Amino acid sequence: MPPVRRATQKELEEAVTALRNGDLVAFPTETVYGLGANARDAGALRRVFEAKGRPADHPLILHLDSVRFLPRWVAEVPPQVEPLARAFWPGPLTLVLPRSEEAPDVLTGGQDTIAIRIPSHPMAQQLLTAFGGGIAAPSANRYGRVSPTRPEHVREELGDAVAVILDGGESSIGVESTILSLAGERPRLLRPGSVTQAQLEAVIGPVEVGAGKGSPRVPGSTAQHYSPQTAVAIVPSTLLESRIDTLLRDARRVAVLAQRPPRKAQQGVTWINAGRRLDAYQHDLYANLRSLDKAGADLILVEEVPSQPDWAAVRDRLTRAAVNPR
Ligand code: TXA
Ligand code: MG
């Protein structure tokens, strides 16, 4: 993997000026690229929703450089925050907490909670510190699409809507942060990510999974999300070649995301072997889906991934990509 880049002084100044002017700045994080706006500028926040084509009631994550600004945005800091922050911040964990008056309604979707994350990517840290405040940032993709893990993905998808795109290389993790709500009676895992349920439980004890009664909305958890334009189907490994045969017989073009090489030569198939290692698979997942999407296939077949708990985030994103093909 190429080394993570730090921003030059000039890049930082440009980005901070853009944020102060109410413009949008795409920046790297260790999970995926974010589409950043000044979190206290309601006009800039509205531009984020416009650029993404995202419904207004889907709240954004607030990014901070450290816990120092937390009390400003949060009405009450639950006791679990301290041990979680020590274990996972800066890093790929987002906490949903009771919000303070500071947070504009556009940011929180009018809910009484706010999602907060402290990213570890050095360039994200540099930007947050230079800006000196909170940056609201959803993933820098069109609503419902695959998240960007490289600056060129952002350029392709959002180009003109963004004043500055900071190039920090490839996101090292590759899937969005784990979201944990501490705003309800019990801790609740709202979106799986590279911080696993087991890792969270080792720090704070039992964690419930999924949206519960009265728990906040997580639009990322609506069925169809993270989708390429080409339809996606998940297929058990043993059935892969026979499914392909059937599709080829109907003269359909097929693209495949697998964890192994093909067992026989089949013409008209674009095949990516993403391997069996979780880190590498996750790191390349969105870039692989993007390139398979460009292969001109009628269908993307994805070899079913392992059912182990640490594959939960990958399984979640693939399952959503496979729902309701367009
Ligand atoms: O890794 C990440 O989290 C990336 C990088 C850029 O930090 N960001 C990201 O943002 O994935 P986005 O907007 O694509 O996903 C944020 C998710 C959405 O599903 C949103 O509904 C949820 O966080 N969310 C935000 N505020 C919330 C709240 N108050 N309660 C529950 N869910 C919330
Ligand atoms: Mg997103």
Image (cartoon, rainbow, N blue to C red):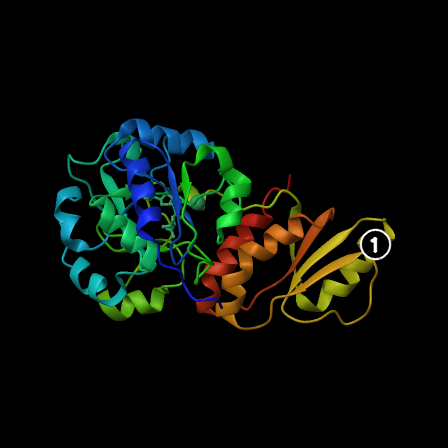
Q: Is 265 situated above or below 245?
A: below
In the displayed structure, does residue 81 sit left or right of residue 206?
Answer: left
Q: Identify which residue, 223 or 276, lies in the foreground.
A: 276
Q: Quadrant of ligand 1?
A: top left
**Residue pictured at 33% horizontal, 42% vertical:** 15
| 222 sits to left or right of 156 | left
What residue sits right under mark 1 in the picture?
248
Q: Quadrant of the C terminus?
A: top right
Q: How dense is the environment of label 1, judged by Cα within 10 Å: few (below 14), some, or many (20 and up)?
A: some
At x 49%, y 33%, the residue is 160
Q: What's under tag 1, amino acid-wise?
A: Leu
Quick check: 255 above or below 264? above
> Along the horizontal axis of the image, is 273 left or right of 184?
right
Residue 301 location, quadrant: bottom right
Position of 308 relative to 128 (above/below) = below
Front-lying residue, 318 or 137: 137
- What residue appears at the point 52 percent right and 68 percent down from the top-left corner? 280
| Place of residue 187 in the rendered image (x, y in percent of width and height, measured from the top left) | 26, 56
182 with respect to 148 (left or right): left
